Image (cartoon, rainbow, N blue to C red):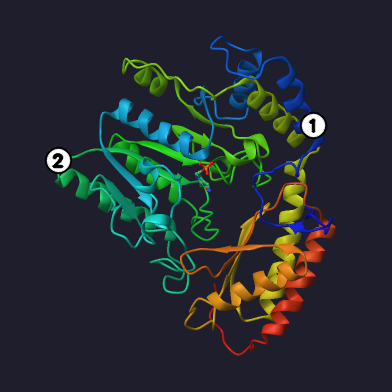
Amino acid sequence: MYDENDQQYLDCINNVCHVGHCHPKTVQAGAEQMKKLNTNSRFLHDNIVLLAQKLVSTMPSSLCMVYFTNSGSEANDLAIRLSRHHTKATEIISLDRAYHGHVISLIDISTYKLDKMVDGVHKKPDFVHIAECPDSFRGKYTKRDHPGEDLGALYASNIDDIIEEIHKKNKNVTCFIAESMQSCGGQVIYPPGYLDKVFKSVRAAGGVCIMDEVQVGFGRVGTHMWSFDAQGVVPDIVTLGKPMGNGHPISAVITTREIAASFEACGVEYFNTYGGNPVSCAIGLAVLDVIESEDLMGNAINIGEAMGKRLHELKEKYTIIGDVRGVGMFWGLDLVKNRTTCEPATEEAAFVVKRLKEGHILFSRDGPHENVLKFKPPMCFDLANVDTLVTNLDRIFSELNMGKENSCES
Ligand code: PMP
């Protein structure tokens, strides 16, 4: 990235310009299509069909129906509509710390925003049920407090409790919605088996499972196109966004034939003025093409290995790093004031981000305490970039001058 003075920045934040800022192929695809037909004509354009087919080819076979939308929020809002029409139930289970979008239906289920609202106007509705965030470093059940225990099962049992409460009120679950890995909540990777157990419980209760891949999809994990796939689960509805248009607003909802049929049977057709316009679809096709032709998933695997090794070396050196977690192009460093109490090192995280920016490296922090350093760069990030980043982190952590005296392990 370059600023107005041509100063170069190393972008470790922007997961929207997925295949690289202004990638020539995505720019060209958009410009070419804009010259021909620039609007949704209300007739089926080839680009819509081609993009839908291409997306479906990357999904488990049950997920074969595609709706095009324009933002992650629109996609998640539509996903909830689909779940309501399919299940005829009302109750939504969402994870603590989640963010799913800026519209009212999603602020309702996003404690990432709800918890910060101070004017009392927008309160969590009764039909929304917030489950524990399955963060095994800083959540209710940690590896420290529950060594050797099945954290996936412990966190999943919280969902069972919620379902029981819902039934006691003579209500039914419509859906469980979560990111496949929780990004806004602090780069949280769920304990093994968690999603599988939750999906079983939710489905047994008649609900559907929605995976939000808005931040973590499109090959970011490297080994798989979709990060739910890397965890061995098959959702009922998947939502896509951010990287899909490399910055151009396009998103999608992908679901099963049965759920789409229930939606169709509601009597109101799906219409969206901009959703699936041919320019957006041309760009979406170009993004998928670049992911493949430049082997960006292979790159994510290599970068993930390098990041893991280098970040764990940093953790050996600096006790301020309480936890290192990640995969592919998705990493988090949970900074702690000391490793015994694991008190969040919020000011220190702010300091690191500020110092990096002074060195022209863009980095962010997140999580409820804003102490988790967050890595989610464009997928063209390379090994030399990893070296630049880690060398600078090393320098800045040494400036923080933390001791090495304690022992709490993640
Ligand atoms: N889901 C997740 C996980 C997100 O991170 C975001 C945006 N940060 C959204 C949904 C909403 O997407 P949009 O801003 O495109 O509406």
Callout 2, which amino acid?
Answer: Asn
Q: Earlier in the sequence, mark 2 or mark 1?
A: 1
The amino acid marked with disc number 1 is Lys
Q: Which residue is mark 2?
A: 170
Q: Nearer the viewer, residue 124 or 227?
A: 124
Q: Quadrant of the C terminus?
A: bottom right
Question: Residue 243, position in %: x, y?
Answer: 64, 40
Q: Would residue 15 be found to the left or right of residue 196 on screen?
A: right
- Element under disc 1: helix
Give the image location of residue 288, x and y in percent: 70, 31
Question: Residue at horizontal 31%, vertical 31%?
Answer: 84
Coordinates of residue 73 in the picture (x, y in percent): 47, 39
In the shown orientation, is residue 119 left or right of residue 169?
right
Confirm if mark 2 falls within 8 A of ligand 1.
no
Viewer-proximal residue among 66 and 58: 66
Kindly indicate the quadrant of the structure image that contains residue 303. Answer: bottom right
Which secondary structure lies at badge 2?
loop
Q: Is residue 12 left or right of residue 227?
A: right
Label drawn at residue 25: 1
Q: Please tell me whether residue 198 is drawn above or below residue 410 in the rendered image.
A: above
**Label 2, label 1: how many angstroms apart (C-alpha)?**
54 Å
